[in-house]
Amino acid sequence: ELANGYAGSDNAAFNADPQDTATPLAMAQLLRKIWDQEILSEESSSLLIDIMYRCQTGEARLKGALPPGTQVAHKTGTIGETTNDVGIIDLPDGAGHVITVVYIKESKLPDNPAMEPVIANIARAIHDYFTFNRG
């Protein structure tokens, strides 16, 4: 409530503030380092990934258009006009995993729920690309 009040009162100032931000590339690199246990112990990495697999928010975001049963370890974010979801999508048949980072900022869509299908469709396109273009 406090965060949405802050962001809602002056979205332009909030969106321009570099504090507490990460680029999509930096976030993808962080997720890879967590997955590969490069920055946390094996136990801490496993715990964090398990928590991300059990994320209960954003069912219509990264997971929203994926085939039923697809597992996703993810973390959502929403504040003001910004809607995000970052995570690791499990590919079918043990084909590996794909890190997916989607930020929507300063969207012209009417509200945050309208942004969720955009995130879902991006995740599905990424999933399908890596599923059907193995080699």
Image: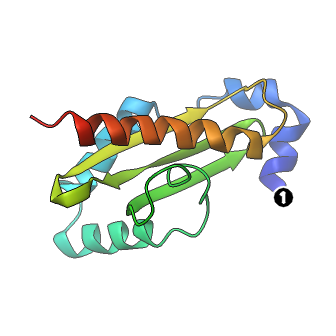
The C terminus appears in which quarter of the rendering?
A: top left
Q: Position of residue 51 (x, y in %)?
A: 42, 72
Density class for disc 1 (Cα within 10 Å; few <14, some 14-19, many ≥20) is few
Residue, disc 1 = 1
Its colouring scheme is rainbow
Left of 80 or right of it: where is 72? left
Q: Nearer the viewer, residue 97 or 35?
A: 97
Relative to 61, say whether 72 is above or below: below
In the image, residue 134 above or below residue 18: below
Q: Position of residue 14 (x, y in %)?
A: 74, 32
Secondary structure state at the residue bearing disc 1: loop
Q: Residue at x 45, y 62 (%)?
A: 68
Amino acid found under the numbered disc labelled 1: Glu
Image quarter in which the N terminus is found: bottom right
Residue 21 visible in the displayed image: no
Q: Give the residue at the far right of this rendering.
A: 9
Residue at image x 26%, y 43%? 131
Residue 82: x and y in percent read 69, 37
Q: Is residue 122 visible?
A: yes
Identify the residue at horizontal 58%, vertical 43% (top origin).
84
Q: Position of residue 23 (x, y in %)?
A: 45, 30
Foreground pick, 112 / 124: 124
